[in-house]
Image (spheres, rainbow, N blue to C red):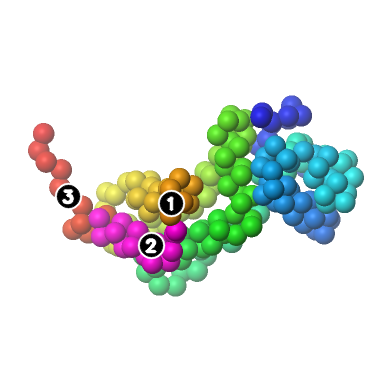
Amino acid sequence: MSVEDGAPAATLRRGRPRSTEAREKILAATEELLSEGGFQAVTMEAVAARAGVAKTTLYRWWPNRAAVALDCVSARMTPIADTSKAGSYRERFQRQLKATIRLLNSSQGHAILALVGAKQTDPVLAQAYSEQIARPRREQTRMLAQQAIEAGEIAAGTDPDLFLDAIYGPLYYRKVVSGEPVTDAFIDRIVDAAFTAFGVGGQRKSKPG
């Protein structure tokens, strides 16, 4: 289904200061609806009814259901950002991936995956998701990879995006496609293998043309 109500999902309407309690009720209701019925279940009417607020309250803060859903998912994904600088970069990536899979395995993760699935057939929602969630979070992890390169834990000249794909790809493949378990031990192996492959002396020299 496409995003309704006309307004672009990437734009959140600015109004009067939000009531923290009401906002949390709305986001919790949105999370429940996403988990139960996917993005199709998230309508402004359903969210308002589940949260026990007037529909006009939603429209005062969000222009459409996509904006509510994106705000919900963005808020739920905040804890996976590893702000601790303790340990090596290898350890920091291990912590971040473990936090990611814990979130995806939770009830909140069901809502996140429902929105990820919905954006595959909704170009407007996909663009908004990319602008509000995917790109900013990718930039955070890209900066972490770049810091690991500068610290000498990853070889100079490494493409940070290729490195990130190498460690996040197996996690999402198992979670979304194969259904195989993603354990802490599996994550440790993924990150260890990536740091070995992309580490100093670990990259293969390109063969002459």
Residue occupying the far front of the picture:
179
Q: CA distance from mark 3 to mark 2?
A: 24 Å
Classify residue 203 as left or right of residue 143: left
Q: Please name the residue that numbered disc 1 is placed on.
A: 174
Magenta-drawn stretch contains 160: no
Q: Please name the residue that numbered disc 2 is placed on.
A: 186
Q: CA distance from mark 2 to mark 1?
A: 11 Å
Give the quadrant of residue 120. Answer: top right
Task: Using the rendered image of the protein, determine whether residue 104 is visible from the camera's viewpoint.
Answer: yes
- Chain-order first, disc 3 or disc 1: 1
Residue 58 position in % (x across, y down): 82, 43
Q: Residue at x 61, y 44 (%)?
A: 114
Q: Dot 1 lies on which element?
A: helix
Residue 158 position in % (x across, y down): 29, 49
- Chain-order first, disc 3 or disc 2: 2
Mark 1 Cα-neighbour bin, 10 Å: few <14, some 14–19, many ≥20 = few
Residue 31 position in % (x across, y down): 70, 51
Mark 2 Cα-neighbour bin, 10 Å: few <14, some 14–19, many ≥20 = some
Question: For the magenta stretch, what is the residue range?
Answer: 181-197
Q: Residue at x 37, y 69 (%)?
A: 88
The C terminus - image quarter? top left
Task: Using the rendered image of the protein, determine whether residue 67 is visible from the camera's viewpoint.
Answer: no
Q: Label 1 is placed on what type of residue?
A: Arg
Q: Dot 2 lies on which element?
A: helix
Q: Please name the residue that numbered disc 3 is placed on.
A: 204
